[in-house]
Amino acid sequence: MPQYDYDLFVIGAGSGGVRAARLAGRAGAKVAIAEQVQIGGTCVLRGCVPKKLFVYASEFSQHFRDAKGFGWTVDWARFDWPTLRDAVQNEVNRLSGLYETNLAATGVEMIDDRVVVVDPHTVRLTREGRSVTAERILVATGGHTTRPTSIKGQDLGITSTEAFVLEELPSSIVIAGGGYIAVEFATIFSGLGVDTTIVYRGERILRGFDHEVRAHVQADLQRTGVKIVCGSTIEEVTSLSEGRKLVTLSNSMKLETDHVMWAIGREPNTANMGLEAAGVRLTERGAIAVDEYSRSSVPSIWAIGDVTDRVNLTPVAIREAVAFIETEFHGRPTAFDHADIASAVFSRPPVGSVGLTEEQARAKGHKLKVFRTNFRPMKHVIAHNDQRVLMKMIVDAKTDLVLGVHIAGVDSPEQIQLAAIAVKAGLTKAQWDLTCAVHPTGAEELVLMGEPVSHDNEAPA
């Protein structure tokens, strides 16, 4: 008789949990994975995938305007919200089905249930009312949207989860928050013709990104019609007639709108899971505290992805899953390196970023050479589109290492993936400059920035 029912029990069937379960099953382990909602997790069902599809839809309004400069007459365009909404839901359900198929192909048992951890090797299936044991437990439950429970009328608002399945496209929306989710949904709704306002407590949106990138994106959103109220918060939301809302801000402004959307952050899914009772240490934010190998304070319990609140990106969760499998099922101790992870914001314009920002590099004591270019892409010139591209490269003045690359403009998420290889590999600016440009492209500017716009004195040898 085996000592445990399973070699691995995975709690949460998002991208990280599914990858871990599949790889463990492929390695010959007996694996179960439990999910209380639908296989696929936030990214597939109510995050990255549907969001990107909505962004694509929102871009057509500008494409139609740009087409006139190239000789096209587009006067028949009409947008239909239910068509987009339903097509996107069909696609995410298709992807969820593929996840199920792939899990089944590797022999993973799928359990539709909410799971509570009983002890280091036991979990309880709350709907079935039974307990099972596992040699290893992997928590991959992700995170969830948050609401400001202290604000009167907060329940009248929606979050990104509900935004994907609205019955009707609103004529106006107020979005609370200035992070990437708020900015991306402002891009989506305004691109679809919705009167859109961002309300953010900080002085400029996209905190944590390079300061010039933040200014560039904020200015372009405002240029294209998004209203941005910084230095203020929502104090109250009240109901008006015909489903409309009145939003009162801390600066005394009052806004009438169809919808209020809370995009003020996410929290780890650890509540009421029995983790602390089982000995698992949580951080102040409720995340599972783990070491570099994703092991919790309990040797038989691991955690990956957003539930650990390290770098909350889907590809990171997947790489953490791979490292876990390498360590535990192949005997090759592997710790995923969280440094220099590229990220993208699908805003207007989109942003691609990897490595240190100028502010972060200076805070770490680097003397810098900063390279920057700002230009209007060839396509935009003939289209009479005023959107510009900002590219910025942060270079260590002593070693010539490229510490960071930050782009705000067309195709920047595509470009940053390749730039991230160079930054991760530790290439110098001189090595970038040895690379021949591909012309005519916007990306060629990454190897043509010849003179720094600022140059600190080199650090002493």
Image (cartoon, rainbow, N blue to C red):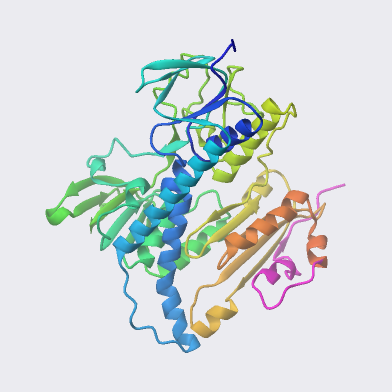
**Residue 446 location, x and y as percent?**
70, 66
Q: Is residue 230 visible?
A: no
Q: Is residue 304 left or right of residue 248?
A: right
Q: Is residue 363 left or right of residue 259?
A: right
Residue lying at 84% horizontally and 48% vertically, measured from the top left: 460
Residue lying at 51% horizontally and 42% vertically, measured from the top left: 101
Q: Which residues are magenta?
A: 435-461
**Residue 168 location, x and y as percent?**
25, 58
Q: In terms of secondary structure, what is the magenta stretch mainly?
A: loop
Circle count:
0
Seen from the viewer's position, the closer of residues 136 and 187 is 136
- Relative vertical location of residue 100 with respect to residue 239 in this rendering, above or below: above
Seen from the viewer's position, the closer of residues 305 and 251 is 305
Residue lying at 62% horizontally and 26% vertically, measured from the top left: 29
Quadrant of residue 144 within the rendered picture:
top left
- Relative vertical location of residue 307 with respect to residue 415 in this rendering, above or below: above
Question: In what quadrant of the picture does the N terminus appear?
Answer: top right
**Residue 332 location, x and y as percent?**
75, 29
**Residue 441 location, x and y as percent?**
66, 74
Seen from the viewer's position, the closer of residues 131 and 53 is 131
Kindly give the residue lying farthest to the bottom in the view shown.
Answer: 71
Kindly give the residue lying farthest to the left in the view shown.
Answer: 241
Q: Is residue 318 visible?
A: yes
